[in-house]
């Protein structure tokens, strides 16, 4: 059972990236998937999540309207489409699988974490 993130990289301010979180050995309907990020010298923060059983989503205020979480059940993959990126979005981004309760998963109470992917927003 594992989660593997991909899609990070270097992008200019105002640019876009799409992160992927590919799951194996996981029954999506039993979980929520959260996206988290940790910038250098800062604590990890939960920024978005989705509950598969009812398609509920949550976005942290600083990314709402710029980032979109979506799923492709056929590929067992969750995406985080990021637009209008800002230097403050620079961080290692992680996905995690946890209980299908937004208030729980967004605080980082997850059962499984990916290895992370670095996003750098810089000119």
Image (tube, helix red, strand yellow):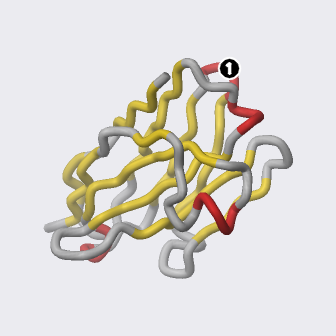
Residue furthest out toward the bottom: 61
The residue that label 1 is drawn on is 74
Q: Secondary structure at mark 1?
A: helix
Q: Nearer the viewer, residue 8 or 107?
A: 107
Give the quadrant of the C terminus: bottom left
In the image, residue 74 above or below residue 95: above
Within-10-Å neighbours for mark 1: few <14, some 14–19, many 20+: few
| Whole-percent x, y for residue 101 in the image | 73, 58
**77 lies left or right of 101:** left
Q: Name the residue located 48 percent from the left edge and 39 percent from the top edge.
A: 112
Judge whether 107 appears above or below 42 on screen. above
Name the foreground residue: 79 vs 114: 114
- The x, y position of residue 85, in whole percent, is 36, 67
Q: Nearer the viewer, residue 111 or 43?
A: 111
| Residue 14 figure quarter | bottom left
Instruction: Give the residue drawn at x 25%, y 66%.
Output: 90
**Left or right of 16 in this view: 74:** right
Q: Is 37 placed left or right of 80 in the picture?
A: left
Residue 102 position, x and y percent, is 69, 62
């Amino acid at each position: 059972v594992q989660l593997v993130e991909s899609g990070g990289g270097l992008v200019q301010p105002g640019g876009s990236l799409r992160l992927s979180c590919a799951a194996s050995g996981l029954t999506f309907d039993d979980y929520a998937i959260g996206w988290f990020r940790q910038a250098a010298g800062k604590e990890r923060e939960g920024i978005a999540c989705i509950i598969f059983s009812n398609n509920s989503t949550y976005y942290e205020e600083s990314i709402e309207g710029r980032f979109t979480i979506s799923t492709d059940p056929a590929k067992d993959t969750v995406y985080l489409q990021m637009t209008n990126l800002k230097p403050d979005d620079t961080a290692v981004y992680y996905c995690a699988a946890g209980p299908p309760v937004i208030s729980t998963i967004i605080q980082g109470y997850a059962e499984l974490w990916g290895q992370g992917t670095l996003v750098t927003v810089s000119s």
